[in-house]
Image (spheres, rainbow, N blue to C red):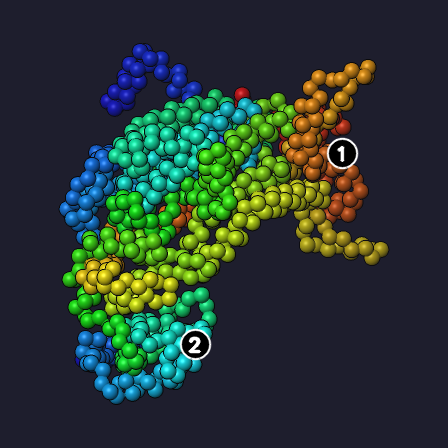
Amino acid sequence: MSTAQRAAGGTADYLDQRTGVGLAVKSFARKIFPDHWSFMLGEIALYSFVVLIISGVFLTMFFVPSMGLITYQGAPASMNGLEMSEAFASTLHLSFDVTGGLLMRQIHHWAALVFMAAIVTHMMRVFFTGAFRKPRELNWVVGFVLMILGLAAGFTGYSLPDDVLSGNGLRITDGVVRAIPVLGSYMSFMIFGGEFPGEHIIPRLFTLHILVIPALILALVGLHLFMVVLHKHTHFPGPGRTEHNVVGFPLFPVYVAKAGGFFFIVFGVLALMGGTLSINPVWNYGPYDPSPVTAGAQPDWYMLFLEGALRLMPGAGMEPVIAGYTLSLNVIIPAMIIPGILFTALALYPFIEAFATGDKREHHLLDRPRNVPTRTAVGVAILTAFFVLILAGSNDIIATHFALSLNDISRFLRVMIFVAPILAFWITKRICLGLQRKDRELVLHGHETGRIVRFSHGEYIEVHKPLDEYERWLRVQHVPQRPLELLPAEDERGVRRKGYRRDAVRARVSRFFFEDRVEPVTPMELAAAHSHGDHDAIGSTTEGHQTPEISSGPERQVGQQVAEPAGGASGSRPGRSADAQDH
Amino acid sequence: MKAIAARRNHRFAPVVLLALALLVTGGLYAAFAPSASSAQTPSASDVEIGSRLFQANCATCHGPDAAGRAEAPSLIGVGAASVDFQVATGRMPMQMNSPQAPAKPPQFDDEQVRQLAAYVASLAPGPAIPTAEQVDPELGDAANGMVLFRTNCAMCHGAAGKGGALTEGKYAPTLEGVEPRHIYEAMTTGPQSMPVFNDANLNPEEKRDIIAFLAEQERGAAGGAELGSIGPVAEGLWAWVVGIGLLIACAVWIGAKSS
């Protein structure tokens, strides 16, 4: 044993004897994680957050969170000799005088944009694959809160440099707060410590941005990851993958290397962006002054939907005066009600779907998005609404860059905010159902080979190559969800049944979700397809294939209420070159 | 010489020759072309030729006496500055009826523009073309220009002067690459949707400060590629396309090595 090994062993032993950490490390190192690129989206968010903390710590060393006025001397020439707040001056000093300061600022800002983008992409993955189902509903809620905290972190940080652009954002915030009925003006005075902009908002945002929000995010990230470990990771359907195991690779050494390496890739990409792409050059906007507003004034992308909602909202006739108080519906609807609807729908979705399915089982196998058409369509509809609002928020940029009329864009999007989500819902659902039908067709008849055979009696047929059992398993493994049956309102003695109303609502929601469906091929259907398909058998023998057998496992009974999946690749098959871990 | 002769059939020889020819042409042009500062005060013949150019190219819309028609404004009293701005940036003659006349390659050379301007200036007094000293960015104060710009200009042209949208298809064009002379003229004459910033509103020194600020903007962004200097929408697009795009590509690469 070399000295290094002895030292390492000694240290590990020392720690183990005092903390018993060995057991934890051992079980943790053997933790199995499934392999799929989409499972790394959350990691992008996590690593961006680490980069945010590292670069943020650097920035706090130089940033002065004060609204005290000073006269700035120094680069750039367009700022030299201007009166500005210490916050803005320190941002300029940090960018132009501190070595590496501008790089750090730009990495920090790009990391913030990518952090939010990764959270949204990760949420999409979880949503469309149904990874939020029992037992993971609470973790979805934790993730949702993390997204809201990310928005808050972005918003508070974006305003810190005290430039004209972010000041305009604060002015909008002030306007939104004032639109709250009765309380608005008082709350605005509370937030800004007096009349907007006051002298307190920057230090207050600073405290929130560097202390409160990151601490909350850190705590919730811990909880989020703890629950991932607790629930074990979900995996996509495939050979050997069941509701009771996880097929993948152990954390140590495979995932330590992969995930650890991925951190450096994320850091590298962010550093590349920070080093080459200019972001938020506050000296273009200048120190905050409440009077000027520039063209092209928008918030960062994750707040753009709010800006879009405000831009889209017609103003005329939207401010009724009730008992001497003005109710600013032109602000309340776009800035509170619309995001309220979007976010509530997002946060509660797992519970709404569980209500519709009445399903109390645990789910560890992910759904293929096509197999749950209504959910996929709802997700696409929400994203479409979000995207329409983002376009509305960018309407002036679209107008100049695509030579369109600003008014036409607004009129078009005012219609689209209602029509586009419905269209998107309908189209997505149809596409999903179509893909499911294609899956059925493939399972029943196999791949087209393009080989045409003529029989002696003159009939032409195309030879179809049957699917191998892995391909078939993927297409038939899911359990179809049917609308819940509504029991009668009265029992056999004519007594009114308790909970009928609730059941009626549930049946209606369930019908909305599951009335239109294409069920997977059952073993009986498959057998029937093959028994009448003599010609396929001919094709198979000429190809040197055997007609696949329909193996129904010992526990499988055809004609059960819940149809069992067909196909040969049953759950007992060990995964290829992979470890399986039982729950 | 022998070495050059030996390479006369080299496959890059035509390219090199072409580059040399362009260099010589450009050099000669730069040496002999009349510069704006060397232009003399307009003579009677300039006004005469300008009048003929006007009749041939502008009178269809602006009328033979330049008094304007239903759709085209009167040019009496708009001054030489207005003609120089509209014609030298290619906005006039107008290509087609659209919400706004866009800048395009100019249809007249500098000499003809000068003659047209002399003719229009002879109709009635109006703003004159600024002198080279009036528009020299080196003599202006960029910091003061920044303050003036964002109070007077940025609400349409954007914080960095990269343009912005107005109503019904009209727009404030980008100020990037616009000659200082034309910026000054635009301020004094208020072309199309732009308001006039006369000397009582922004005095000549302040106009020069704004030009100095815009020249400062042309130096480029301190932090790398500008992404159009149009603010957070472009940044968001880059974060999604380049940032998330690259990272997902890497995730696919890492995830693809097994299973």
User: In the picture provided, is A322 more to the left or to the right than A240?
Assistant: left
Q: Quadrant of residue A193?
A: top left
Q: Which mark is residue B69?
A: 2
Task: Report helix, strand or loop for mark 1.
Answer: helix
In which quadrant will I find the C terminus of chain A?
A: top right
Q: Is residue B112 above or below residue A5?
A: below
Q: Which residue is denoted by mark 1 in the rendering?
A: A524
Which chain's residue wears label 2?
B
| Image x and y of residue A401, in percent | 42, 58
Q: Residue furthest right?
A: A457
Q: Residue furthest front?
A: A324
Q: Amino acid at mark 1?
A: Met
| Image x and y of residue A28, in percent | 42, 22
Q: Is residue A218 above or below residue A421?
A: above
Which chain's residue wears label 1?
A
Res B248 visible? no
Q: Quadrant of residue A91?
A: top left
Query: Depth check: B246 or A335 in front?
Result: A335
Q: Amino acid at mark 2?
A: Arg
At 49% from the left and 35% from the top, the residue drawn is A322
User: In the picture provided, is A336 more to the left or to the right than A276?
Assistant: right
Q: Which mark is residue A438?
A: none
Q: Quadrant of residue A468?
A: top right
User: In the picture provided, is A390 more to the left or to the right than B83?
Assistant: right
